[in-house]
Image (cartoon, helix red, strand yellow):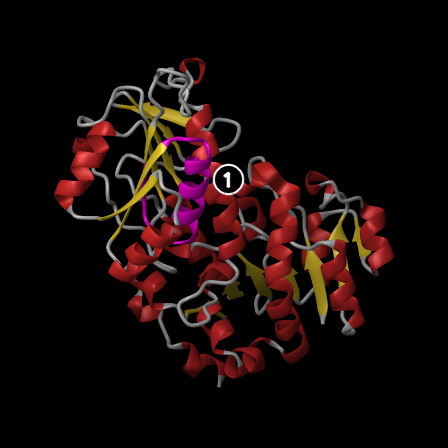
Amino acid sequence: MRIGCPKEIKNNENRVGLTPSAVHSYVAAGHELFMEKGAGLGSAIEDEEYVKAGATILSTAKEVWDAVDMIVKVKEPLEAEYRLMRENQLLYTYFHFAADEHLTRACLEQKIIALAYETVQEGRALPLLKPMSEVAGRMSSLMGAFYSAKTQGGRGLLPMGVTGVASAEVLVLGGGVVGTNAAHVAAGLNTRVSILDINLNRLEYLSESMPANVEALYNDPVTLETELRTADIVIGAVLVPGAKAPKLIRREHLAMMKPGAVIVDVAIDQGGCFETSRPTTHSDPTFVVDGILHYCVANMPGAYARTSTYALNNATIRYGLKLANLGVEKACREDAALKAGLNMYKGVITYMEVAEAFGMMDKYQAPEKVIG
């Protein structure tokens, strides 16, 4: 198979879809690899490293898209890339369709095959989402701490406190991979952490495994409002695979919070779990609503691109090789995890939550029907 990796064009998206070691793995399996010139520079990877691994360097993104059967990326195609997508071309990347109707309709119109990292699922685990969830979760506490500074629009609170002065209170919504990592880092900063979830088994695990300054609580309306009133930093870490994130915090909740408190919405790439959230970029990361500072960057791991790129490739290469070696249809028939990742197939939506998000059930077919 001919496989290509263009440079990411999203604002400050410094990750790249393939590392040299991933290129080497594809080439060793008999595939041809094409990289756009400079695609890896944001992750401190030079073109020469790709050449040594067996890739051909092409000058433009269009050349890459035109040359290959399978595109490996990090983020969803942006509008400038829609015209580059070709019918029947396999795109292997994060899509988050349920948060973007325009993208969904464009990919349907182009009749691509969309294999979405975020919905590849083994049991209840999301192996291709996990590494970036770890990065974003750990970042969320750091961003909350940074933007708590008065000079950044926050309350002027040093989260870890000092002698004789209390540390900050951090509220984490969701006890999954993002929330767990956020809580660990917040605890390491010596803050007082509450982590809310509705899964009692998960709460039991969190209670047993978290540091002493982390309290795991059941998320009901009374507890949520009580915790919001005292929180200095609130981290949104909820996820419904492939679907829009639930809006746990409504606008009226902001009036309960301390002026200058910081919200970090890690769920923003799935629509956000705060009613007042909207996607921001690393160039313009924050905004204020009703006195509450919102950080809603949709590609948080792009800030720590080299770490994120290598962590992502460690997870994606196994499935990518299966797609390339077997073809998408056979790979999805043989591997239930990959079949769960199939969101779109040649003009048909194959992931129900995406079709439901936009009232497009007439465009939906179960993946079993389209892959044979």
Q: Residue at x 26, y 59 (%)?
A: 199
Could you tell whether 301 is left or right of 184 in the image?
right
Q: Residue at x 40, y 14 (%)?
A: 150
What x and y, as percent, mark residue 354?
A: 36, 61
- The amino acid pointed to by label 1 is Met
- Taking the spot 42% from the left edge, 82% from the top edge, the residue there is 369
Magenta residues, start to end: 171-191
Q: Position of residue 184 (x, y in %)?
A: 44, 42
**Residue 177 part of the magenta segment:** yes
User: Looking at the image, is 86 positioned above or below residue 19?
Assistant: below
Given residues 314 and 51, the one toward you in this image is 314
In screen coordinates, is 235 left or right of 77? left
Task: Label 1: state its secondary structure.
Answer: helix
**Does 347 appear in magenta?**
no
For label 1, the crowd category at 10 Å Cα-Cα, with few meaning under 14, some 14 to 19 and many 20 or more, is many
Determine if residue 358 is in view.
no
- Residue named by callout 1: 300
Residue 363 in view in this figure: yes
Q: 19 and 200: which one is in front?
A: 200
96 up-or-down from 231: above or below: below
**Which residue extends farthest bottom?**
372
> Residue 293's quadrant in the figure?
top left
Total labels drawn: 1
Q: Position of residue 144 (x, y in %)?
A: 41, 30
Q: Residue at x 29, y 57 (%)?
A: 204
Q: Position of residue 341 (x, y in %)?
A: 47, 68
Quarter in which the N terminus is drawn: bottom right
On the image, which quarter does residue 52 sit in?
A: bottom right
Q: Is residue 318 above or below residue 327?
A: above
